[in-house]
Image (cartoon, rainbow, N blue to C red):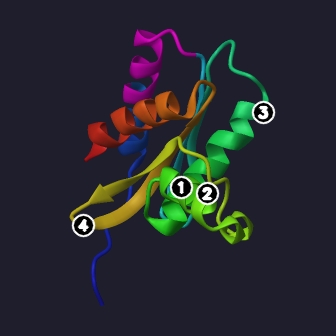
């Protein structure tokens, strides 16, 4: 049997704090979701002013990234090439989520929603970098 790394409560808090700082630095009102590698929610924050729908979208983006171990933008691009990917059963396939990697393994993902998708991804990357 092997040991498998996983996110701790402290990791989730560190990632969330880094995401919030990046969003506040740019005056972006977003929702932030941190999930484990199975797509289960570990942490969530909806900033004041973030749209209600951004909560579900952030979680869906993160689920895509966690379960596929790829940034959600990968699938957004695939859908443009092959529309059949739109039916892929792994969350919301829009840019804005990145996997959290540790020693070559995906231990979770961060999804963000509330501004332009490429800006959402910048916030998610800040959180992932804080834990990496």
Q: Secondary structure at mark 2?
A: helix
Screen quadrant of the N terminus: bottom left
Residue shown at 52%/53% (left/top)? Answer: 72
Position of residue 10 measured from the top left corner of the image (x, y, whole percent): 36, 41
Q: Nearer the viewer, residue 45 or 69?
A: 69
Residue 40 visible (yes or no): no
Residue shown at 37%/38% (left/top)? Answer: 125
Q: Quadrant of residue 56?
A: top right
Q: Secondary structure at mark 4?
A: loop
Earlier along the polypeptide chain: callout 2 or callout 4? 2
Q: Secondary structure at mark 1?
A: helix
Image marks 2 and 4: residues in contact by CB distance under 8 Å: no
Earlier along the polypeptide chain: callout 4 or callout 3? 3
Tag 2 residue: 80
Position of residue 88 measured from the top left corner of the image (x, y, whole percent): 68, 70
Tag 3 residue: 53
Please tell me the numbered disc located at residue 104: 4
Question: Alpha-carbon distance for marks 3 and 2?
Answer: 23 Å
Asked whether, in this view, residue 5 is left or right of residue 12, the answer is: left
Query: Which stretch appears magenta?
Result: 18-28
Earlier along the polypeptide chain: callout 1 or callout 3? 3
Earlier along the polypeptide chain: callout 1 or callout 4? 1
Question: Alpha-carbon distance for marks 1 and 4?
Answer: 24 Å
Specify few, some or many for label 4: CA neighbours under 10 Å numbering under 14, 14-19, or 20 or more: few
Tag 1 residue: 77
Magenta stretch containing residue 82, yes or no? Answer: no
Give the mark count: 4
Image marks 1 and 3: residues in contact by CB distance under 8 Å: no
Question: Alpha-carbon distance for marks 2 and 1?
Answer: 5 Å
Position of residue 51 measured from the top left corner of the image (x, y, whole percent): 74, 23
Residue 121 visible (yes or no): yes
Specify few, some or many for label 2: CA neighbours under 10 Å numbering under 14, 14-19, or 20 or more: few
């Amino acid at each position: 049997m092997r040991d498998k790394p996983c996110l701790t409560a402290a990791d989730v808090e560190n990632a969330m704090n880094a995401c919030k700082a990046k969003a506040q630095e740019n005056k972006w009102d977003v929702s932030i979701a941190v999930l484990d590698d199975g797509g289960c929610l570990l942490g969530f924050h909806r900033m004041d002013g973030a749209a209600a729908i951004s909560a579900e979208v952030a979680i869906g983006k993160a689920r895509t990234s966690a379960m596929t171990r790829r940034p959600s933008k990968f699938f957004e691009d695939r859908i443009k090439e092959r529309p059949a990917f739109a039916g892929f059963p792994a969350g919301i396939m829009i840019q804005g989520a990145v996997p959290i990697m540790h020693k070559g393994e995906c231990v979770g993902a961060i999804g963000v929603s509330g501004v332009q998708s490429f800006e959402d991804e910048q916030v998610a990357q800040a959180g992932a970098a804080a834990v990496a």
